[in-house]
Amino acid sequence: MNTPVPGRGRVGWADEILERRLPSWPAVTSGDVVDSRESIARRRRFGWIFAAVWSVYLITPLRRAWELDGDVARVYTLIAIVAFGIAYIGSFWRLLQLPMTGPAWPNPPSRLVFPLLALQLALLGAVAVTLHSHAVPLAVYPASFLAFTLPIAQAIPTLIGLILVTAVIPQAVAGDAPDWDIIQSMAMSAFAVGGIRQLIQRNQQLNLARQQLTELAIAEERLRVGRDVHDILGHSLTIITVKTELAQRLMEIDPERAKQELVDVERLARESLAGVRSTVGGLREVSLAGELTNARTALRAAEIEADLPVADGLPTRHSVVFAWVLREAITNIVRHSGARHATVRVSPLSIEISDDGGGLGDGKFGSGLSGLSERVRATGGTLTVANRPEGGLRVLASFPAAPMGDPR
């Protein structure tokens, strides 16, 4: 039986409980869409620079162009080589302007890749008019471009055709043997760049799979909590409804029986409320050992070196508060600090989390740290959050010494 709450459906109960239960790890949640968009924006701003780095190898053909006899040939060749370099870098820049959603790049449409490739080859041919065979090494650029942009089924035959057009057929026409060094350079550069492309795509697919698995886990947890709440309330509310209707009918003919039914209704309502509170309380329960495991996973995913204590021998007196402090501190480190190293120290009376990131910034607490400070203070402790002299942030929750005879 569905048990809706005014303004919320049955699933609303599960959502409300999950908001309290699910930790705010930024590992792979729907919030990562924002991080993905930021990553795409950075790629658009700076991705073309990685293509521009290789323009350093244009120095040799530029030097040969400068040594040509005749001002017209020299100027023409220099302009053609510069135009070729701009076309190569501009091709990557153009691809970076494509819409990027999910693991869709580098995988641009062939109808865009081939015109850009043709432009590079046309300018390569323009350089070859004056440099002749000395222009052939420039074919490494379009070879790497097609390996990074075309799927393997198209890249291999296109690369073979490029090798024939640039390093085999012209030499055969001139009566020379193919330049095997250039052919090897083209094949190896295409293989290396194609491998990088495959690594990028595999990483994107892994990230997408992790996100999907997390979303499935959250959905499964939502269904489970919904079932738990429904099981707790469904039967009780059905009986309460029946007994209330019966009490209404008996109010005139048998007041004593009606009174007894209302007493039963009250008892069932209290039992149902206790069951819901027990369920929610169990879902909100945290443990220091569990949060250390979550922290290790989150820091590893963020590529932050972690120095964490082992689960054996952890203190028990303040373990729940320590768990909340650890959760909030690690979340802030992963999300905001930019740190490369994080350290956690736990003693019977304190927990300290430090990092080498950007520190507290303007010195103001966010809502998370403010709520954490209130939680620690409510249990008799003190929360200290301060920038470290050597850089980074230090979060310390400490408690006074326990009276003699108390457990640690």
Image (cartoon, grey):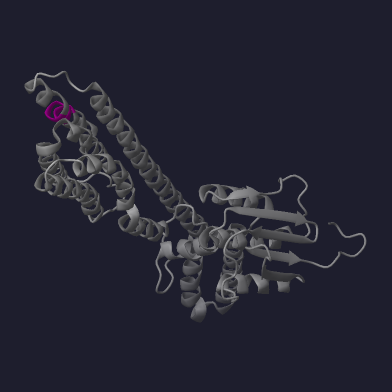
Task: Give above or below for 290 relative to 390.
Answer: above
Counting from the top left corner in percent of width and height, residue 199 is at 37, 38
Residue nearest the observer in this picture, 293 or 276: 293
Residue nearest the observer in this picture, 267 or 259: 267
> Which contiguous range is marked in magenta?
160-166
| Residue 363 belongs to the span the image colors magenta | no
Counting from the top left corner in percent of width and height, residue 68 is at 16, 40
The answer to whether 87 appears left or right of 290 in the picture is: left
Q: Is residue 103 visible?
A: no
At x 42% / y 63%, what residue is drawn?
Answer: 10
Counting from the top left corner in percent of width and height, residue 201 is at 33, 41
Task: Give above or below for 229 relative to 245.
Answer: above
Residue nearest the observer in this picture, 205 or 377: 205
At x 58% / y 60%, what residue is drawn?
Answer: 357
Residue closest to the far right: 404
The answer to whether 224 appears left or right of 123 in the picture is: right
Residue closest to the far left: 173
Quadrant of res 142: top left
The answer to whether 223 appears left or right of 88 in the picture is: right
Quadrant of res 404: bottom right
- Quadrant location of the N terminus in the rendered image: bottom left
Quadrant of res 137: top left
